[in-house]
Amino acid sequence: MSASRQAQVRLGLGVAGASALAFMAVAIAITIPQLTIKASLFMVVALGGALAVVMSGRAKEVLLGLYIIALTYNRQYFSFDNILGNNGSEGLYWIPGDPFLILLILTGMLESATGSAPPREPPTPVFIIAFPAFAFLVPCIVSALLAERPDLSFNELTRVVRFVVVLIWLQRNMTMSLWYTAIGVFTLSILLQAGLGTVQVVLHADRNLLSVFGQAGEQVLNNDGQVDVLDNRARGTLGHPNYLAPYLLTLLPACLGMTYYSRVRLSRLIAFVVLLAGVAGMIATKSRVPIGLMGISFIVVTIVAIRERRISLASAAGGAVLALTVLSGLAMYYKDAIYERIWGDFTASVNFRTEYNEAALEIWNDAPVFGIGPNNLTLGLSRHSAWFHWLAVQLEQFRGDISVRAVAPVHNVYLLILAETGVVGLFGFIILLSSVFRRSVRAFTVSVGGVRGICLGISVGLAVQFVQQTIDFSQWFDPSWYTLAVLMALVGSVPALRPVLR
């Protein structure tokens, strides 16, 4: 396409975007008196995003950034109940990131159709990109066809399909600017989630976001009719500390890696500030195992950096002494609260997980090869554990009130996958996770500078996250599940793109 034709296309897109903004402004002016503060904030974000798309000329970068951020707003909207019926938390839903994903793909298609797409390296074949994801998707499909409730399994299959779509589209369309955008937005996401989580704890806010600013909003009540504040633990917009802590656990080692490997003072400073904010947010979650695994991940990243002469042993030792001194001082000041958090419900937590694991294994025994079907766990609980089935049913009451998929499956993602998709599905799931880790290690070996440090951190973060999932199920739920697809595309693109951060 000629330069003049490309200019005409861009002008047409700009006019269309400006017209859309005008219509949005009119709509906001008409509806703003009826909007809540929360809805008004969303309208402002949407308008700002649309304005950024039009003014920047970088539609895909803006949409990718909005998608990554939207993934951390852990809400599920069951808008299909009138068509498919109300199936509770097992029903079909969409998440805030889906509209941005659709717009991102449509923008790419429009650029390809008009010939305005930026030049890029020949894309990696789809089979190579998606084989690990298909290794999990295929067993899920077979399991769904054999399930007691195939309709519920179909709802869950859409999540696996979306993972595959994100992975394939993003890696095949990855450009240097998209890669840098994703890294920058993940940095912003850490600051937002850790900062908000810390503020939630400092101000003793309840579950809803606007309560930080003194506004009433969605609240969850306990059995006594009081606001459930989760023992004043950070949760950001992910809605629960057990979602926020694993999210930060995956990303924070990359900040430490950037601090060690970058040779630009400003980059190291930014990475270090984000790291400190993230650590504060992690501690504010009061999640015991993730905090311990975070410490282990930092030790591993530091050892590798020492071996590669990115930091001296003396500097590492001095930093460790300083960090331990600060943490010891804080620990002494909050020793009673820390002791209570570690040991107060430790036995109950262990017993809960142990009993749930046993129930999951009993369900798996019903169908060891392909499981009872994705999204059919509650049906299995009704036969094998009256207590956990009652718990799952009780959580259903929150689905309609706060637009969230309120579930509490077995707190071991591997046993969850095993029970629902059998040994074949679990094998495919392990292939998928192993491939993400292998690609991140590969990205580390072929990169240099700050990118090498980021890839090292992602590799270590993924490793400790996979350990965390033995007592957790967050990796299977939307924020971490789709974030994993984005990370897989990012590290998978490094060998071809060879991005540079000095």
Image: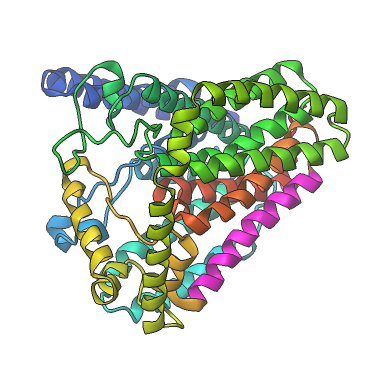
| Residue 291 x %, y % | 55, 39
Q: Is 402 drawn above or below residue 279 in the view shown?
A: below
Total numbered circles = 0
Q: Quadrant of the C terminus?
A: top right
Quadrant of the rendered structure where residue 131 is?
Answer: bottom right
Q: Quadrant of the N terminus?
A: top right
Residue ID at (43%, 61%)? 160
Residue ID at (37%, 24%)? 200
Q: Nearer the viewer, residue 119 or 4?
A: 119
Residue ID at (36%, 83%)? 366
Give the colouring mode of the picture: rainbow
Residue 369 visible within the image? yes
Q: Nearer the viewer, residue 371 or 118?
A: 371
Q: Nearer the viewer, residue 92 or 17?
A: 92
Residue ID at (24%, 46%)? 77
Q: Is 120 drawn above or below residue 183 in the view shown?
A: below
Provide the residue span drawn in magenta.
Answer: 424-446
Query: Residue 116 magenta-drawn?
Result: no
